Amino acid sequence: MIFSTIKTNFYGRSELLKDETAVLSLLYAPLMEDCSLNLYMSMLSLNALKVNGNYDLLMKLTHLSLDELEICKDNLEKLQLIRTYFYEGKHQIMIQPPKSLQEFLKHDVLARLYLQKMGPELYHELIAYFQLKPIDRFGEEISSSYDSSIFKDYSSKQEQQLQEVLGNSVKSNFDQQLFLQIATETMFPSSLRTSENLKIIEELFNRYSPTLREMVNEVANCIDMNNNFDTEKLKRSMANSLIDVPSDVSDPFQWKAEQFLQQRQPDVPLIEADLMIIELLRTKYSFDDSVINVIIDYALKNGKGQLNKNYVEKIATTFKRNKVKNFIDAKDSLSFEKPVRTTKKAIKKVEYEIDSEEKADPKAIEEVLAKLKKGK
């Protein structure tokens, strides 16, 4: 049950790509009431404007009663378009994009719901709308090409040299083929898909680490009505996603936590998960930013550059137990992670000797041996 006064914070998606809008309209919309779709679009818009309010605001925007709003919200959760988390009296609402066509069709629940409600005829008809058929504009290719016979004199030493060069080169995380599949002709026209433009996009992708869909969206926003691609605008837009790091403070540990984390990874925008970890340390553990920065610094150094939430909370819990209140306390408290030293104890070698007075009688030994031979 929800109350109109419960505060809501929005995270996740703030806009949809063209293909996502199509899936939402044609596949999701038939599975929900109009009010649910209206609520979803309102949440997207509020998140885009960075507006956090309460359910009373959503009631006014959607003209729904509290009971109607709860039903619509529940519908969005069941369709996996939003996820709701409860934290310190607030609802943290994570907005999810619609699934792709392939994901929708493979989903155990969504695909069956659609088939059940819309019937098999419309189901197959709509699927056909989404399937892009390649256009054979040029006919059969008859170009000349190299074959493996040109490498008959290629030595194993040359292959080794090649592998060394490839091993030392920077590996790209950019999946160009998938990027071009996601980007529609309207968003990124074929005339702009030159090797030079794709190289710029790949470099920016590897530097700033967005998702492929986010990269498509960034590229589309830099193409005007005349299909001119402003690569400088794209570079500025990607750079603006970074948080500004101050230059007038000599000690980074005194910066805001977001700025400190950005300074530790200068070319990578902060992701939502990182920001939520910082907010968690501020609200749940009541740490000031200098203490949070010590935790971030320690977690990154010991987590191979990754900010792991479970490890961060382990450090934070230890700080709370040690009553850490400031930067000095935090630095002193880091001893909890020091390895335990083991001390090797020297074992004194003891030699046992039989006292000369207690030595066995040779005659008695001979008697025992004789009995053993006889089997007694």
Image (cartoon, rainbow, N blue to C red):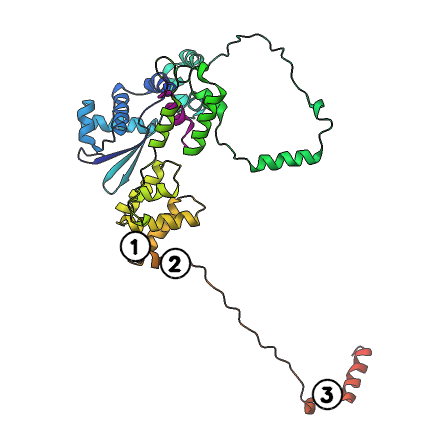
Query: Which mark sits nearer the N-terminus, 2 or 1?
Result: 1
Coordinates of residue 231 in the picture (x, y in percent): 40, 23
Determine which residue is flagged by label 1: 327
Toward which corner of the image does residue 117 lie, by quadrant?
A: top left
Magenta stretch: residue 220 in it?
yes
Mark 1 secondary-structure assignment:
helix
Which of these two is toward me, 130 or 126?
Answer: 130
Per the model, the C-alpha gap separating discs 3 and 2 is: 61 Å
Query: Which mark sits nearer the N-terminus, 3 or 2?
Result: 2
Furthest-front residue in this view: 248
Q: Judge left or right: residue 360 versus residue 113.
A: right
Mark 2 secondary-structure assignment:
helix
Mark 3 secondary-structure assignment:
loop
Question: Disc 3 residue type?
Answer: Ala
Determine which residue is flagged by label 3: 360
Question: Disc 1 residue type?
Answer: Phe
Vertical arrangement, residue 166 with respect to residue 20, above or below: below
Coordinates of residue 304 in the picture (x, y in percent): 45, 46
Mark 2 closeness class: few <14, some 14–19, many ≥20 residues within 10 Å: few
Question: Disc 2 residue type?
Answer: Phe
Per the model, the C-alpha gap separating discs 2 and 1 is: 16 Å
Q: Are marks 3 and 2 in contact (CB under 8 Å)?
A: no
Query: Which mark sits nearer the N-terminus, 3 or 1?
Result: 1
Residue 98 makes an appearance in the image = no
Toward which corner of the image does residue 361 lie, by quadrant?
A: bottom right
Determine which residue is flagged by label 2: 336
